[in-house]
Amino acid sequence: MKTVEFYITKEMIGKRIFATSAYTARARESLGTLPAITERMLATADDTAVLNPLIDDSINEVFTFIVRYLPESIVEFCNDGYRFAIKAPENFPADNGGKLEQCIESYIADRALQEWYANVKPDEAAITAARTQNEAATLQALLTQRVKPTRQEEKL
C-alpha cells in the first residue's frame, strides 16, 4: 500500500472560485447579459460565509467518491484547508498524485460554484454541472488506473 498525500487550502479553492466566477461573468456580459445579472454571478471574499459550507459539502462529496475506489483513504478538515491521504495499491501510478490533487481541487471549486450559481443564476449551474461531471470522470479514471508490472517485476 502506498499513500498519496497533499493539502488543499480553503484559500486556493476560494481563489479558483472567485477567478472562475469573474471570468464567467465577463464572458456572459460580452455576450449581452445585463451587468446587473453578471454582477450577481461574481463570488467574492464577502461571500465566504455562504461559500464555505458549499466547499465543505463538495469535500464530503469528493471524499465519498474516493473511498468508493480506495476505501482506506482519509481526509482531515483543518482550520485553513483539507489534508488528503489517499491509500492506494503499490501498482498505482506514481505521477497520479499531482494529477489527483489538481483534479480534486478543480472538482471542489466547480461543485461549490455550481451550488452558488443554483442560487444566483440557475442556468449557469447547468453549465458548471457538466464541467463537474467531466472532472468526476477524470477523478474516477485516475483512482482506478494501475501500472502493469514489467517482466522483471513478474520474476521477482
Image (tube, rainbow, N blue to C red):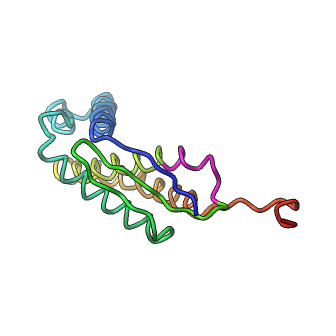
| Quarter of the view holding residue 132 | bottom left
78 versus 15 height, above or below? below
Residue 9 locus on image (x, y percent): 31, 40
Q: How many marks can you see?
A: 0
- Depth check: give the residue in front, 131 or 26: 131
Q: Position of residue 1 (x, y in %)?
A: 58, 64
Q: Which residue sits at x=33%, y=63%?
A: 61
Residue 63 x %, y %: 37, 62
In this rendering, would 131 be left or right of 118? right
The residue positioned 63% from the left and 61% from the top of the image is: 145
Task: State the residue in front, 40 or 44.
Answer: 44
* Residue 95 counted in the magenta span: yes
x%, y% of residue 71?
46, 71
What residue sits 23% from the left and 48% below the top? 117
Which quarter of the figure is the C terminus placed in?
bottom right
Answer left or right for 74 relative to 52.
Answer: right
> Is 80 one of the magenta-colored residues?
no
Magenta residues (range): 92-100
The residue shown at (33%, 31%) is 23
Q: Residue furthest front?
A: 156
Foreground residue among 155 and 70? 155
When the figure is inspected, residue 9 is found, relative to residue 141, above or below; the finding is above
Q: Nearer the viewer, residue 51 or 69?
A: 69
